[in-house]
Image (cartoon, rainbow, N blue to C red):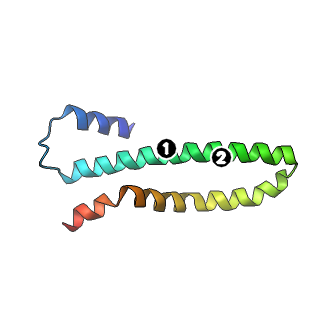
Amino acid sequence: MEAILTLFENTLILKSPFKLSFRSSYSHYKLKRLLLNTIWGLINIFMIVFAIQNMIESHFEMLWIVPLIIYVLSYWIISSMLIDTLIGDEIDNQLSK
């Protein structure tokens, strides 16, 4: 909901293209992060469903539990590092100027 409100705020309020405030860059960062997290999550959901189907067909359901637990524990750490690398850390860059 916050992303939709941010999108409307950015499109309805006319701003000078030469002046960006901290709030607008923070909202832009949050929107990009939300979109990349959504795409990353959908890719991972499809991969998990595919892997579960293969495990059920090969009758190794119990073997699937350990890698799944490890994957779930490391998912958010890896995804946050990957997404921060892709979109850059605009908030820290804005604060350091």
Could you say where residue 9 lies in the image, as x and y percent from the top left?
Answer: 25, 36
Which label belongs to residue 38?
1
Residue at the location (54% across, 58% down)? 76
Q: Which residue is mark 2?
A: 47
Q: Amino acid at mark 1?
A: Thr
Could you say where residue 86 lies in the image, as x and y percent from the top left?
Answer: 41, 56
Instruction: Say left or right for 39 vs 18.
Output: right
Residue at the location (28% across, 52% down)? 26
The residue furthest right is 59
Mark 1 surroundings: few (<14), some (14-19) or many (≥20) residues within 10 A: few
Instruction: Say left or right for 76 vs 53.
Output: left
| C-alpha distance separating marks 2 and 1 | 14 Å
Q: Quadrant of the C terminus?
A: bottom left
Please report contact status of discs 2 and 1: CB closer than 8 Å, yes or no: no
Q: Nearer the viewer, residue 15 or 87?
A: 87
Q: How many marks?
A: 2
Instruction: Say left or right for 81 vs 25.
Output: right
Whichever of callouts 2 and 1 sits on the residue coming sooner in the sequence is: 1
The residue furthest bottom is 96
Residue at the location (37% across, 40% down)? 3
Residue at the location (57% across, 45% down)? 43
Up/down of 32 relative to 8, above or below: below
Q: Amino acid at mark 2?
A: Met
- At mark 1, the secondary structure is helix
- Give the image quarter of residue 95: bottom left
